[in-house]
Amino acid sequence: MKLTRKLWIGIAALMVLSPLGVILPDYFKAESAWGEWGLDQIQKMTGYVPQGFQRLSELWKAPLPDYAFQGWEGKDLFHLSFAYIISAFVGIAIIAGVALLLGKVLVKEHE
């Protein structure tokens, strides 16, 4: 089996496992997945929000906030898991597309 095929199979497995980010915090009654805290959660956990974090938090808005579609925030775990998988697919497609495009541009420059 080619290395690239193994890589794509591994990526597909990770996409299918991505709903664990919503299932495990719900199972353990945690507020959110580790490292996915917003300003309000950081304020609650630490008692303050660093200035740099507060300033830079407005720099980027996620295309699919909370890995869900607009209006799906209150849906059940099945719908949220589906949205996680779609979010993973969209993210991987964008990164792969940019990498392929960049690769083609760089190859043409060196020909």
Image: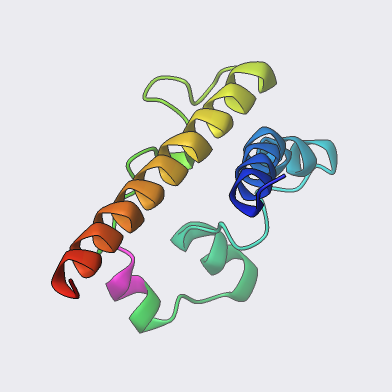
> In the displayed image of the protein, which residue is found farthest to the bottom?
51
Residue shown at 58% from the left, 22% from the top: 82
Left or right placement of residue 55 versus residue 67 in this view: left
Left or right placement of residue 3 versus residue 105 in this view: right
Which corner quadrant holds the C terminus? bottom left
Residue shown at 45% from the left, 62% from the top: 39
Residue shown at 14% from the left, 72% from the top: 109
Residue 103: give x, y in percent of width and height. Answer: 30, 62
Total marks drawn? 0
Q: Quadrant of residue 45?
A: bottom right
Camera-nearest residue between 63 and 50:
63
Q: Main secondary structure of the magenta part?
A: helix
Residue 99: give x, y in percent of width and height. Answer: 34, 57
Q: Is residue 109 above or below residue 50?
A: above
Q: Quadrant of residue 9?
A: top right
Magenta residues (range): 54-58
69 falls in the magenta region:
no
Camera-nearest residue between 13 and 86:
13
Residue 7: give x, y in percent of width and height. Answer: 63, 50
Camera-nearest residue between 109 and 77:
109
Camera-nearest residue between 73 and 22:
22
Which corner quadrant holds the N terminus? top right
55 falls in the magenta region:
yes
Q: Is residue 73 above or below residue 97?
A: above
Residue 63: give x, y in percent of width and height. Answer: 32, 41
Residue shown at 57% from the left, 31% from the top: 85
Q: Quadrant of residue 55?
A: bottom left
> In the displayed image of the protein, which residue is found farthest to the right?
28
